[in-house]
Amino acid sequence: MDFTKEVEANLFMLIENTKFLKQMADALGDCDEKGKIQNFLKESANKRRLQIGEKVIQMGQDHKDTCKAIDQAKEESATTEELARKVKELKQDAAKKSSNVKNKAKYKCFKKEMESHAGLAVVAGSTSDDNCSMSEVVQTGGDVFSLHDPWSMMLMTEPVRNKMCGHIYDRGSVNAMIKDNLSVRCPVSGCANKHYIQPSHLVDDLEVLEKLRRHQILEVDSDSDDSD
């Protein structure tokens, strides 16, 4: 299991759930007379999901610190006992140097997206990077697409576009889905395309591939800033 990918997937799902709640609240409109769903949405975005996201990001940081400590300790230790002691020392040093999760770029991006999708006003200046995004959306033809594959929920590596509807998938995921199944439709919620996905419907999307590369560069820069 790639722990870093699992962290990204969990943060992405928190954002997607918030978007779903917002859509449900908008659909109910006047039916939500007492504003229960709207209040739940705001509370969820402001507290519950932000708190969960904070814990997930902290777990990701702890995992990185542990892996880094183990790699360094391996080169400096001659016995398993010395290795364990060295790893503990390095993790303690990392914990002392590490800033609060809420000050990290990843959390600020997550918070900004949560507030945005919940329909809440994002505080001006909450982040200095306008391109900061957990899911790094791409706009094409007025629609918004995520850089995460709709099946695996992981960041895509080989984005392909369905010519029949314009939605984007990871080549590995969509090929696995349609390999032995000729009745797979587009999995994106609300898609009006009724055609079953065929290999001939899929084309490489170089624009999204470039967005993915930029996203990866931003991630590396973010990690570098956090480690300073």
Image (cartoon, rainbow, N blue to C red):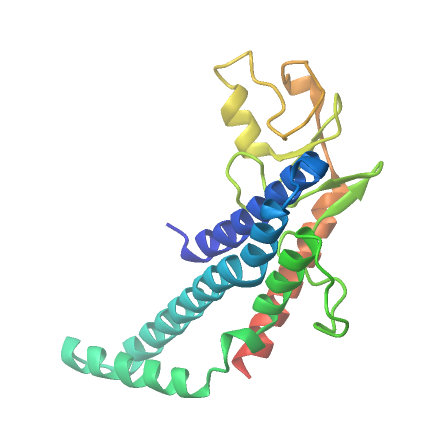
Q: Is residue 182 above or below residue 107?
A: above
| Residue 19 seen by the camera | yes
| Residue 157 seen by the camera | no
Residue 9 percent location from the top left of the image: 50, 49
Who's the residue at 61% across and 63% down the image?
Answer: 111
Who's the residue at 36% across and 69% down the image?
Answer: 67
Who's the residue at 56% across and 58% down the image?
Answer: 43
Residue 95 percent location from the top left of the image: 39, 82
Total marks placed: 0
Nearer-the-camera pick, 103 or 165: 103
Q: Residue furthest right?
A: 141
Q: Is residue 47 above or below residue 38?
A: below
Residue 41 percent location from the top left of the image: 59, 51
In the rendered view, does 47 fall on the left or right side of 197? left
Residue 184: image quadrant is: top right
Residue 153 percent location from the top left of the image: 53, 42
Q: Is residue 88 above or below residue 220?
A: below
- The C terminus is located in which quarter? bottom right
Nearer-the-camera pick, 167 or 108: 108
Residue 63: image quadrant is: bottom left
Who's the residue at 49% across and 59% down the image?
Answer: 48
In the rendered view, does 92 fall on the left or right side of 189? left
Nearer-the-camera pick, 33 or 171: 33
